[in-house]
Image (tube, rainbow, N blue to C red):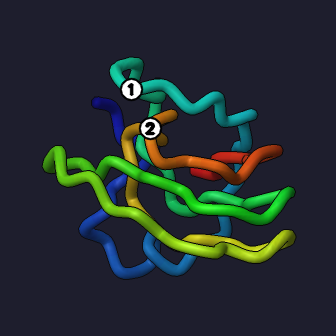
């Protein structure tokens, strides 16, 4: 899994995301890059998979909400939110 920048640098951690991609939930296909955050366009639940393979369910994320999380995938199982955008 590739990082776009040095996550351990405090300066890098405070930078805004500069690249974005449409998130298509899938139970086994990982993103090309780890996210810094996920924007949710249509409200619902979001099941993210972290860099260390832990599935985390965020319940009732509102439309227009943002989940600040380093994730390698959004699972389709348990995810009801749509129109998501990954940022890195």
Q: Quadrant of the N terminus?
A: top left
Q: Where is residue 34 shown, x and y percent of the image?
A: 42, 43
- On screen, residue 49 versus residue 22, left or right, reads left
SS of the residue under disc 2 = loop
- On screen, residue 26 versus residue 80, left or right, reads left
- Residue sitting nearer the eye, 75 or 16: 75
Residue neighbourhood size for the residue with mark 2, other residues' Cα within 10 Å, grouped as few (<14), some (14–19), many (≥20): few
Q: Residue at x 17, y 44 (%)?
A: 53
- On screen, residue 34 versus residue 15, left or right, reads left
Asked if the residue under mark 2 is in contact with the one under mark 1, i.e. CB atoms within 8 Å, the reply is: yes
- Residue sitting nearer the eye, 6 or 77: 77
Q: Which residue is mark 1?
A: 27
Q: Where is residue 12 shown, x and y percent of the image?
A: 45, 69
Q: Residue at x 63, y 75 (%)?
A: 60
- On screen, residue 40 versus residue 53, left or right, reads right
Q: Residue at x 48, y 41 (%)?
A: 74
Q: Which residue is mark 2?
A: 77
Residue neighbourhood size for the residue with mark 1, other residues' Cα within 10 Å, grouped as few (<14), some (14–19), many (≥20): some
């Amino acid at each position: 899994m590739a990082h776009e920048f040095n996550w351990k640098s405090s300066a890098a951690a405070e930078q805004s995301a500069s690249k974005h991609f449409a998130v298509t939930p899938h139970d086994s296909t990982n993103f090309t890059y780890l996210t810094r955050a996920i924007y949710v366009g249509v409200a619902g639940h979001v099941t993210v998979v972290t860099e260390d393979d832990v599935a985390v369910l965020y319940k009732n994320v509102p439309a227009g909400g943002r989940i600040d999380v380093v994730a390698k995938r959004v699972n389709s199982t348990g995810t009801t939110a749509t129109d998501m955008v990954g940022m890195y």
